Image: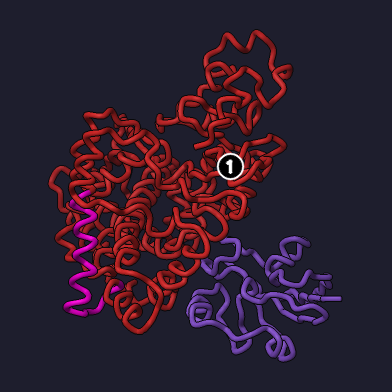
Chain colours: A purple, B red
Amino acid sequence: MTTVIYTAHDGTETIVEGTPGVSIMETALRNGVPGIVGECGGSMSCATCHVFVSDETAAIAGEMSELEDEMLDGTAVEREERSRLSCQIKLIEGETYRVTTPSEQV
Amino acid sequence: MATDITTAPASTGRCPVDHGQFGAASHDASGDSAEDHYGYEPFDMTDPFPSYERLRHHAPVYFDERIGYWVVTRYDDVKGVFDDWETFSSENAQAPVRPRSEGAKKIMDEGGFTAYSGLSARVPPEHTRIRAIAQRAFTPRRFKVLEPTIRENTIAALDAMLASPDATGDFLTDIAYDIPTITILTLLGVDPAMVPTYKRWSDSRAAMTWGDLTDEEQLPHARNLVEYWQECIQLVVRAHRDGGDSLVSDLVRAQEDGAEISDHEIASLCYSLLFAGHETTTTLIANSARVLLSHREQWERLLEDQKLIPGAIDEVLRYSGSILAWRRRALKDAEIGGVAVPKGADILLVMGSANRDEAVFENPDEFDITRPDARSHLSFGYGIHYCLGNQLAKLQAKIVLEETIARAPQLRLVEGAEISFGENLSFRAPTSVPVTWKA
């Protein structure tokens, strides 16, 4: 089982079963999880799928590319150390992911 | 081009949509029947929106034999095709809608014209490879650096326009032409003095690819495209020779450091960016002034609260996008909105219609700068080809609105001035935006 736990800015938790290979952004859109916009559809061009990942998630989410790092300079809510673009994190079979969504994406 | 497209439903009178829902009487009214394509005229950009609405209701996916394209007008269908790049290829996105004439072909062959597409009509994996390299130039970190210069240029252009003794100007040529064009030329290391030249070449590119030109009309445009392409090649040659501080020299250096990108691909990117990088932003800026000033109460709201500007720009993009239709090709037999389209079918995705789909947007024909979901518009496309310059375009439109509001809050459209739009399959660009600030 692959699981994503989304915590909204107000603390509301949404737990979704994900499909390996699909991104955290797309998993949110497919399941109607609020707090992620994903305006460009995952091509790293809009920075509207910004999330804060937990330490455990950071460890399994893979390295951030230089491009993602630069795109994070344009998020609606100021980036933090644990900021990622959720379109760039593809789910791995059997893992559990924890992300918090910012108060604003646009 | 598919050969089986001649069996397409619309051309044999078998429309994919039930004709029973609109009675025979409605066939009398112009634009109301399948025979007259519900009033849709592919190249007429004057006011295509009423015909889009009829198409969404009566024939949301139909084959238009006049252009040889399946026309798709509902939001979910347009977005779905954009998203499914494995079934629907962008390979036809830069193909001439009207075949090139023999004369034009000769000019282009003799002139060594070998450009096709920088990115928009490339497909994975080569698209993925080149986009990853090009995208580095369009991140917020990069263009935040440009902001002060864009603002300076905007202020200078506004001051020049506002110095006009008769207190009238053309927001298109006085403001919208220069601002984004100077930005992209500067990014690519081109002298801003060449703005008029690049505008001439860009007009030719838009006309040759998406226009409805006669054989004779194609000739001067063909010459312009040869000049344009040769200049793109020279940009790469010069970057190799002189280095420098521009996107072209960055790409050349990346290549020398082992990035997998050829000189022809870099020149093609220049060919792409030196068109796409300003053409549609010029239109966005012109449309921002045109649409906001023709909805005075919305303009007044912006004067009171500048925080509404970003939302207003997205609403302009939704309500009056710079590109209303974009192309794809089916790589296999497929289905769009329940309608079967054959392998090889050419498809026209009408974002201008999707953006006014009542299934998605409430009161879609109303222009409302505080619309909460304006950003769901598809004017930048969706998925792997999503407009690379979306944020830079919006940033420039925002700067222009901020500075215009600060300097000319009393700006208005010249009364009675007819604003027309050039004929084109995809681009809807006003040919002038006459403004005045007379007391």
Q: Secondary structure at mark 1?
A: helix
Of residue B140 and residue B95, the one placed in the foreground of this image is: B95
Q: Is residue B203 above or below residue B309?
A: above
Relative side of B73 to A96, left or right: left
Q: Does the magenta portion include B240?
A: yes
Task: Give the residue drawn at x 66%, y 45%.
Answer: B76
Residue B421: x %, y % from top left: 35, 35
Residues rendered magenta in the picture: B226-247
Residue nearest the observer in this picture, B285 or A72: A72
The chain containing the residue under callout 1 comes to: B
Quadrant of the rendered structure where residue B180 is?
A: bottom left
Q: Residue at x 69, y 71 (%)?
A: A23
Q: Residue furthest right?
A: A1
Q: Main secondary structure of the magenta part?
A: helix
Between A1 and A36, the one lying in front of the other is A1
How crowded pointer 1 is (Cα within 10 Å; few <14, some 14-19, many 20+) is rated as: many
Q: Quadrant of the N terminus of chain A?
A: bottom right
- The reply to whether residue B154 is visible in this rendering is yes
Callout 1 amino acid: Ala
Magenta-drawn stretch contains A4 = no
> In x, y percent, where is residue B348?
52, 39
Give residue B360's position: percent from left, percent from top.
66, 45
The residue shown at (53%, 17%) is B36
Residue hosting label 1: B354
Tell me residue B411's x, y (percent): 31, 47
Q: In the figure, B214 relative to B248: above or below?
A: above
Quarter assignment of residue B430: top left
Which residue sits at x=29%, y=46%?
B205
From the viewer's perspective, is B255 left or right of B135?
left
